[in-house]
């Protein structure tokens, strides 16, 4: 692990396993309160990762990182279609509400927030927009499948900058799923007969040899929740779960990502993370992967 990155300084909040760090951005610090995520983060990335609860972090502490760009991926459960959608009444929104007060004080040069599509139009969304008064806002859903990744992961992104930016996303040719798979299927990932008897008809299955195959979004519940948490793989005459290494490749992480050996834990961390391809594209579009801008100048 070396840390020779240059470019605008990025603060990765709700850092998880480091979807922003994996993009190549010059992350100067990361914060997350979860122990397993923190262990993976510190074993994978050279810059400091702080295990802290953001609900009470002080403005001075975040300002001291002198970051140009703040990245925020707050918990999505208050906004998911399958959850209770309690929005700001969900306690998991408390840290976001606190951070919005901090943002009003520190005013980073740019801020990107990522969440599930259900965030759009929520009370939390309105609170974010209010706190970002004076910034130019650009909001839209992005999916890595547009960048040629054979996996759906549509997410809402809000980009706040000093000057208006209009990030564009190219539509790139689909890369074959086979290129993301382990050399041989892991027998431990094979679906057993009992599982197939119960859920076989409800599974979304993709064929490893199909060059047009696109996996459904693999969420943190994959492996726990049999349906609607991601696709299964038909390969060599059998049916398999995607292995953590395969999910990591689809999410755009490098091979050195130090995931837990426990498959469920690894899958949960990956399923809660970010599409690194989209992060890289978006940061590139706002000029946050290049040289550090001159002080006071807009990022673009
Ligand atoms: C949707 S995940 C973001 C994952 C991350 N973007 C990644 O690349 O892996 C939300 C993260 O926020 C963290 N989190 C939730 N509430 C928090 C809080 N109050 N303080 C610090 N971290 C928190 C969770 O532990 C989880 O890792």
Image (cartoon, helix red, strand yellow):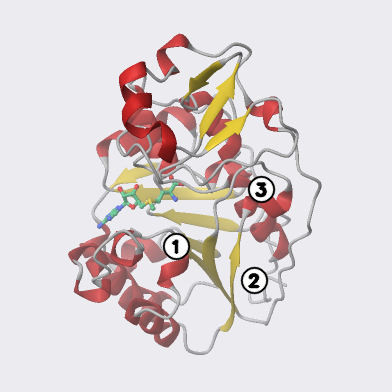
Q: Is 183 placed left or right of 92 in the picture?
A: right
In this view of the protein, which residue sits in the foreground, 217 or 67?
217
Q: Which of marks 3 and 1 is nearer the N terminus?
A: 3
Quarter of the picture containing the N terminus is top right
Identify the element where label 3 is drawn.
loop
For residue 143, above or below residue 229: below
Q: Nearer the viewer, mark 2 or mark 1?
A: 1
For residue 254, above or below residue 279: above
Q: Is mark 2 within 8 Å of ligand 1?
A: no
Q: Mark 3 points at which residue?
A: 6
Identify the element where label 1 is drawn.
strand
**Disc 2/disc 1 C-alpha distance (Å):** 30 Å
Q: Local crowd at mark 1 within 10 Å, few (<14), some, or many (≥20)?
A: many
Q: Residue 85 lies in what quarter of the image?
A: bottom left
For residue 212, above or below residue 284: above
Q: Where is residue 242 in the image (x, y as percent from the top left)?
A: 50, 27
For residue 281, above or below residue 216: below
Q: Residue 4 lies in what quarter of the image?
A: top right
Q: Where is residue 172 in the image (x, y as percent from the top left)?
A: 80, 51
Q: Name the residue under label 1.
A: 115
Q: Which residue is drawn at 41% across and 20% down?
A: 191
Q: Residue at x 71, y 54 (%)?
A: 146
Q: Residue at x 73, y 55 (%)?
A: 290
Q: Can residue 66 be seen in this view?
A: no
Quarter of the picture containing the C terminus is bottom right
Identify the element where label 2 is drawn.
loop
Q: Mark 2 points at which residue?
A: 295
Q: Does the residue labelled 1 lie within 8 Å of ligand 1?
A: yes
Q: Position of residue 213 (x, y in %)?
A: 67, 38
Q: Where is residue 75 in the image (x, y as percent from the top left)?
A: 33, 58
């Amino acid at each position: 692990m070396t840390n020779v990155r240059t470019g605008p300084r990025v603060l990765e909040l709700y850092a998880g396993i480091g979807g922003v760090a994996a993009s190549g951005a010059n992350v100067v610090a990361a914060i997350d309160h979860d122990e397993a995520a923190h262990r993976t983060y510190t074993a994978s990335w050279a810059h400091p990762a702080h295990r802290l609860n953001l609900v009470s972090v002080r403005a001075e502490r975040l300002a001291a990182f002198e970051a140009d760009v703040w990245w925020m991926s707050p918990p999505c459960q208050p906004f998911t279609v399958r959850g209770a959608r309690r929005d700001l009444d969900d306690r998991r929104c408390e840290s976001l509400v606190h951070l919005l007060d901090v943002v009003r004080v520190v005013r980073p040069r740019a801020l990107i927030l990522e969440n599930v599509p259900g965030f759009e139009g929520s009370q939390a969304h309105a609170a974010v927009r209010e706190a970002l008064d004076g910034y130019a806002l650009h909001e839209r859903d992005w999916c890595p499948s547009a960048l040629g990744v054979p996996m759906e992961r549509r997410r809402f992104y809000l980009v706040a900058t000093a000057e208006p930016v209009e990030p564009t996303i190219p539509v790139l040719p689909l890369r074959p799923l086979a290129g993301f798979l382990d050399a041989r299927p892991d027998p431990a990932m094979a679906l057993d007969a009992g599982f197939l008897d119960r859920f076989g008809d409800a599974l979304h299955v993709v064929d490893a040899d199909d060059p047009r195959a696109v996996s459904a979004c693999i969420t943190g519940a994959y492996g726990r929740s049999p349906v609607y948490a991601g696709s299964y793989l038909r390969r060599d005459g059998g049916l398999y779960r995607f292995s953590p290494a395969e999910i990591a490749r689809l999410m755009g992480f490098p091979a050195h990502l130090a995931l837990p050996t426990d498959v469920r834990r690894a899958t949960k961390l990956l399923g809660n993370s970010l599409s690194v391809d989209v992060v890289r594209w978006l940061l590139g579009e706002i000029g946050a992967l290049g040289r550090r801008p001159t002080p006071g100048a807009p990022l673009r």
